[in-house]
Amino acid sequence: MTAMQILAVPRLLLAAAQSGSGKTTLFCGILRALLDKGLRAAAFKSGPDYIDPMFHTRVIGAPSHNLDIFLTGKENVKRLLAKNAADKDMALLEGAMGYYDGMADSCDGSAYDLARTVGAPVVLIVNGKGAALSMGAIVKGFKEFRPDSGIRGVILNNVTEMTYRFYKDTLEKETGVRFYGYFPHMKDCSLESRHLGLVTAGEVGNLETIVQKLADQAAKSIDLDGLVALARSAAPLPYAPLDIRPLGRVRIAVARDKAFCFYYQDALDLLAELGAEIVPFSPLTDTVLPDCDGLYIGGGYPELYARQLTDNASMRRDIREKLAGGLPCYAECGGFMYLMEGFKADDGFYPWVGAVQGRCWMTKRLVRFGYVTLTAHGDNVLCKAGGSIPAHEFHYSDSDQNGAAFRAVKALRRVSWPCAQATETMYAGYPHIHLWGNPEFAENFVRACVRYQKKGAAK
């Protein structure tokens, strides 16, 4: 750890009263509108969400980043915000769920908790459909629910210009909060959802058109200059950077396509800082793995591409043979499924890689959902016995061989279960981890890649 430093970048968090308030849609519109004004903005998402940052990334043309207090801890949240916003004009943060919604019955890990941690003023997005003065009660309730709520502004969604102008002064007087504008209902700018949330950004063919319409509307009905001024009121944020140095020069193949797309950008960046060259490939369309010293297969939607994954027999065979030969591998959730013997669907059984035991299938509900802490029963590629890291599970699939290399303990509620198959060269399991939650896991994986590289060079 190096000496304390100060982040002075303007920052602002957009939150909502509840999920479904149109927060992501408005966030993308405001983000693009700020870029259209010539501001260099960094985008962040609170919580473990993989999908919303994909939309942010498409809007700004650069990676968006997650800020998750449970998965990485408060000090790392500050470090990651500082690291990724240091050269920007401002940082725009999108909250998750309702503003105070955290773990179980607490505010821990909520957007409110994040705003306090990084000292970001908050603008609350309120869905005004079917309401009038009652919107004031919502705003006042949220502002006063906690004395340090940080709520400094409001944007109304799904209201007409006439409604906004008629009620604005009264609502500001009743709540003591400044209103920064409104968004009308924009039917042609809605985004589809499915079982894990919104469809991914790459699947929306007219996303650029939608985002530009949202940006044009934001420029028309949102006080953008006022939001920038509010962001600039954020106090300087002290933080302590970590000293991360390369452990060697290795190549890690990362599965990135429509089937495997759930990654934390900062986790990939950490591997790169430790000396890894990130080499993307597609299990859907590439015939074999690229030349590599390690393999990382993240989550996503393999069930939607079951037949295509099966039909790519050369890729499945190459992965199976390379893993049998000791190639270090880290696979989570959808990646874990793909490494199994196969996928059971309504229309039959689809053989997959077969590098780990078990078969998987889809269910009709979330399985083992939520934040957990993982502790290893024995030594493995990521850690020694007793090694621990925060994680989360969010999947509708299940398998007959979930593994028992780790024990997952549910956050705040002492429910636990065994999980993950792991060896000295492989971790494969349903839990998602963020490598910043315990950077030693990343270091150990890169060291395993270095050993594999040296082993190959010695032949």
Image (spheres, rainbow, N blue to C red):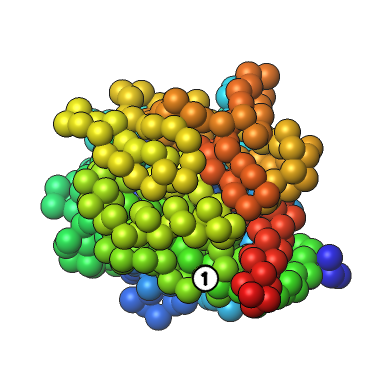
Left or right, 304 with respect to 13, comes to left
Image coords of residue 307 (percent x, y):
21, 46
Number of marks drawn: 1
Disc 1 on helix, strand or loop? loop
Q: Judge by depth and name the residue closer to the eye, 76 or 262.
A: 262
Give the residue drawn at x 71%, y 57%: 444
Q: In the drawing, does residue 248 fall left or right of residue 256?
A: right
Q: Write down the residue under mark 1.
A: 292
**Dot 1 crowding, Cα within 10 Å, few <14, some 14–19, many 20+:** many
Residue 88 % position (x, y): 54, 76
Q: Is residue 151 above or below residue 414?
A: below
User: Could one spot residue 417 in this view of the protein?
Assistant: yes
Instruction: Name the spot of residue 182 as percent of width and height, x first.
Output: 30, 51
Residue 134 position (above or below residue 23):
above
Query: Looking at the rendering, in which quadrant would you find the C terminus?
Result: bottom right
**Which residue is at a point 58% across and 78% down the rendered structure image?**
87
Q: Taking 344 as reference, is 328 left or right? A: right
Which residue extends farthest front?
Answer: 459
Q: Quadrant of residue 151?
A: top right
Q: Amino acid at mark 1?
A: Cys
